[in-house]
Amino acid sequence: MYKGRKKIVPILIFLTILWFVSEGIAHDDKIVHPKITEEAIRRSNLEEYLTTNLGFLEGSEKSLRASGKSRTIEGWLKEGSALEDDPICRATNHFHNPLESWNSSYMSDEPWYIRHWCNLTGYATRYSSITWGTGYESATGPIISRTNQEMGWDNAKNYYYSALTSTSGENYETYLARTFQALGHVLHLLQDASVPAHVRNDFRSHLEFIGLQSINPISWFGNLFEHYVKNHPGFEAIQSGIPPFVNPQVTDFWDTDGFTDGNPPPSNVPLGLAELTNANYFSDGTIPNNHPSSAHWFAYPMLNSTNYWICEDYAPDSSDIVKYISRRECSLLSQERLADHFAAISLLNEESSITSTNIPNLRLELDDNVHNTYARELVPKAVGYSAGLLEYFFRGKLQVSAVPIFYSNSIVYLRTKIKNMTPNETLTNGTFIVTYSYRPSWGRADGSDDYWGQSPLVSSGTLVYDGEETVIDFWLPVSIPNENYNSAKFILAFRGTLGNEEGAVIGKAITLGEIKFSEEWDNGFTGNHHWAHTDINLLDQNLSNGSTSNVIEGDTLIKDNIRFVGHRTARVNESFLDYSYNSGQFRDILPILITPDTYLQFKIDAMSINDIPPAPAGQTSHWQALILHFNNGLSLQYFQEGQGLYTGSNTVYLTFPLGSVIVDNIYEMFRGAGISVPEPLYLESIDFLQQLLHLDDPSTVQHHQHMQIDSIRVIEGRQN
């Protein structure tokens, strides 16, 4: 009966604690974790990423609504870093001893009644913080599923991909909010690796702290070091750096496996935060001088008489003088407490034993001066590693040039040139997908009426860093009408292998460039542009030797040029815009500046002649083409086989398939032909030409040139 009561009392005490406790056993989740996360955001490149890759001009102040509440991106990150301790038994997975195998490096020194309670509340399986946060049980192993874990690194990647590929504004915001919330949870776990007790299997120090609190204290279940940081955050003085990993994997931020039991910590390579903390700092229950249990004994930091000194300084909040173990030679006694406080020498030591040669045998403790020293060194590390982890999640960088491809006055394809710009990492074994939306003319400003669409998945192939571009035409099943062009939004998403991380996700917002010229023939002859049509006698070429016509049928310009039987004189039918003709009468919006990202798009459904006029060997007796003239005498000539005419070495001669939308980069056409492009380059004339040239003898058959022109555009591609 008495033994039973002894077991019941601890349970009742612990249940009472749980009744009052709303936070966890780590850095304070209401003050410290959110503040470290806030500082990590400031010191990372997250703001730049959000602006340049996702198009959020507000950066981390971008508001996202999910689960009935609205938070900024920073707010979701900070909320996640606070909620990782809720419920309290979740925090049993916040420990990682880097000297153990990851599948056994979890907390193992909790009392039986705490384990029993957490078993009852659904947290029976123990995970190390590195496994709980990332899913990995070893640096090279597969990701495992974890009971009750929906806010790990793998979850954040899945939420991010779901956001990038969502086809509704509500789902986009919800999944994006969960992305940042999950990242906040993971940051919390990494930040806990800056607490010595969490990397030295020292849950017991938390219980000792509870015993030291007053009768109404249980508002924070931490240890003495965490309690000190909570009350003395000192973030205004933080100078933190991101760890200099080279091609890391996510687990490296905790544990690189570079520090192993029995060996001194290496000084020439960056370590994970758990390794760094474990190797260099004590927790209350793991000071080797104090004869800890085998579960709490660590070889490092190794106190010796060579690299440590005994120094004096004022006790915390007191004028009493106490002695400390210092990692550097002693400084003068001062109210600023400038001595290095690595460990306090306990008053339980006999005065005669406190000598430099006896340092390894002195009983030590950690007071608030020591906590201050540790905090000034470890909290900046928590900030720096957190900033590095944020940058690692969003490290993927794509350079994307995009140009829309039109059909029937709507965007039906998006041509992209994609280049991997992630430093020193190869992108492979993945897929690309484009998600897009546009607002109809009657749509509400909140986006609730927007139309959404998604391209099919396309294989990514392999893209090395700063290597060749891949060109992908993404089909848009929900076409975007031309009148909604300015409201169109596009997001390119990649999921696959990036460097040594499988399942990496990259997002890239795509902005369309300017439509510099567009003609669909849907508003009559001159509804869109002031075209000249030479179905009249021009320069005495069109005598009474035939007929020419230009008509609009539906949204197609149909051109016919006919020379009757028995005639040999020339005949022409042109539809053109020209910068200089007749003092600029048909200049319209010419000239148009052409850049390396300017594209010509056109669709011609027919370009034929019947019959072909006879001509001397090596000469042409007819000519039918789309011709673009530029400054410095340059031109592009598009024709069908046998219908072109050589006009000099400054012309690029191109055949094309009828009935297809032709999309050509103008600069690339000239460069491909070995023609130097002047700077600046201007388009000065657009000419749909039909010409029957002079014959030596009268024709014995009718010659009929026929052309059906669906559309022509000049579009500025946009490099994102």
Image (cartoon, rainbow, N blue to C red):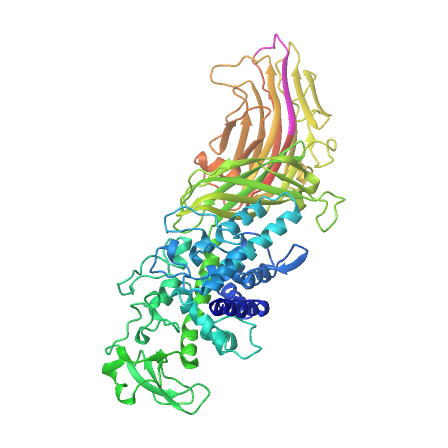
Residue plotted at (56% across, 76% down): 217
Q: Is residue 69 magenta?
A: no
Q: Position of residue 208 (x, y in %)?
A: 45, 74
Name the side, left or right, on which 212 lies relative to 267: right
Front residue of 242 and 697: 242
What is the span of residues highlighted in magenta in the rendered image?
A: 697-710
Q: Position of residue 295 (x, y in %)?
A: 35, 65
Front residue of 476 and 211: 211
Residue 600: which quarter of the image?
A: top right
Q: Position of residue 245 (x, y in %)?
A: 37, 58
Residue plotted at (55% across, 44% down): 492
Up/down of 679 relative to 320, above or below: above
Q: Position of residue 179 (x, y in %)?
A: 55, 53
Up/down of 2 relative to 94, above or below: below
- Could you tell me if residue 513 is visible in this image? no
Q: Is residue 699 magenta?
A: yes
Looking at the image, which residue sits at the far right? 442
Looking at the image, which residue sits at the far front? 1
